[in-house]
Image: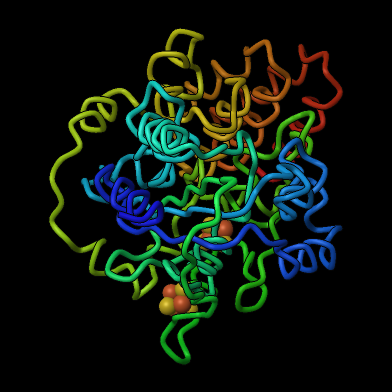
Amino acid sequence: MSLTSQIKEFALDLGYSKVGIIPADDFQEYIDELTNRSEMYAFYIQSPYRPLNSAKPRSVMPTAKSIITTVYDYSQKEFPKELTDIMGRVYQARAYNAPPEHVNGARTQLMRDFLRKLGCEVGENIILPERLVAAKAGIVDFGRNNFAYAEGIGSFIYLTSFLVDQELEYDSPTVEVGCPKGCSACMKACPTQAIYEPNKLNPSRCIPFNTFFTQDGMAGSYIQPEIREKMGTKVYGCDICQEVCPRNQARIKAKLPEDRFLSKVVEDFSLANMLNMTDEFHATRIQPLMFNYVKERKYLQRNAAIALGNLGDPAFVPDLAVAMENKEELVRSYAAWALGKIGGKQAIQILKENLSKETSAAVKKEIKAALFVS
Ligand code: SF4
Ligand code: SF4
């Protein structure tokens, strides 16, 4: 059996749904796209991911010859609605950037170990443009919402590629948009109009960006009030432009087996619990799902405050009153915003009381703005 066949067979045996291979050439179209929109993507270009470097695979791994790319179907079990309302499916599935102690991280590690056993050098910590890699290898095409779609599955897929130093047999590309003619359901459904034309996203308007790239040391922790309003109840990611997509309906409507881990977690995984969570709750309930981007709980507490404000239910005013006592300015600021959104006598009273004792200028500003709108 050829090296290529051994690799592909092993990947399928591991549970990947598709596997393809391309030469490790530069992704010039990706470099051009990022460079042309460098202002929009500055947060990413300058991030530790250094995407412009790894878009030239041989500049980060001089021995690189091939890229093996895989599709993992992460929507094989049911996602509880309570969780889908607040977070993206890929995070619920513990698929994205999973550490080796999670089954999805262990799968990646097994693949690496196998490639090394076959005599391949395998690149480490190299962030390749996964969707383009997979399209060039013919295992996905694109939706107008920018997601990659795998035939027979849809876009609820996770792509992982492996940069190796061996010449292999290469696949044919499917770098094309596979959407039905005239469909723009994703663009219409996006609450923030982040997809400003087919296949063009303004990341700073996209809800996932606002739920996890808005951290100090990244894009700054401030979220524009206009975007807060449109985040709805999302605290971690957003699947709206995939949920409305006709290409995902078969999977969304399918009766899938229960995910017992999620059924257990969902029991105490609520916005109010997140808002005023302790370190222990964060470590034991939140981190097992949200282990990707947000390490400090204050950002998730901010997101939970925004979600509660958008829910507009006065039943959560007492929870927000507790959040107004939080030691983090960020949490107090967004709790104030949420109280202003909910409005009513009790919320206004709490805002006034806190204004008189608040010492932070930033929080005072949010309280005053909240009192103005409520
Ligand atoms: S992920 Fe959400 S916010 Fe981003 S483009 Fe899709 S629908 Fe819009
Ligand atoms: S909603 Fe329509 S246009 Fe958007 S990705 Fe799906 S099929 Fe394509």
**In-image side of 136 versus 244 (left or right):** right
Residue 185 visible within the image: no
Pick the front one: 91 or 303: 91
Pick the front one: 249 or 155: 155
Residue drawn at (58%, 64%) of the image: 132
Farthest-out residue, front: 1
Residue drawn at (46%, 26%) of the image: 99
**In-image side of 82 versus 91 (left or right):** left
Residue drawn at (79%, 36%) of the image: 220
**In-image side of 347 versus 7 (left or right):** right
Pick the front one: 19 or 227: 19
Q: Quadrant of ligand 2?
A: bottom left
Q: How many marks?
A: 0
Residue drawn at (59%, 32%) of the image: 293
Q: Position of residue 56 (x, y in %)?
A: 75, 54
Up/down of 289 relative to 328, above or below: below
Q: Quadrant of residue 181?
A: bottom left
Pick the front one: 320 or 194: 194
Q: Position of residue 204 (x, y in %)?
A: 72, 54
Which colour scheme appears in the figure? rainbow
Q: Quadrant of the N terminus?
A: bottom left
Residue 39 visible within the image: yes
Up/down of 249 relative to 127, above or below: below
Q: Quadrant of the C terminus?
A: top right
Q: Position of residue 174 (x, y in %)?
A: 49, 76
Up/down of 97 relative to 159, above or below: above
Farthest-out residue, bottom: 181
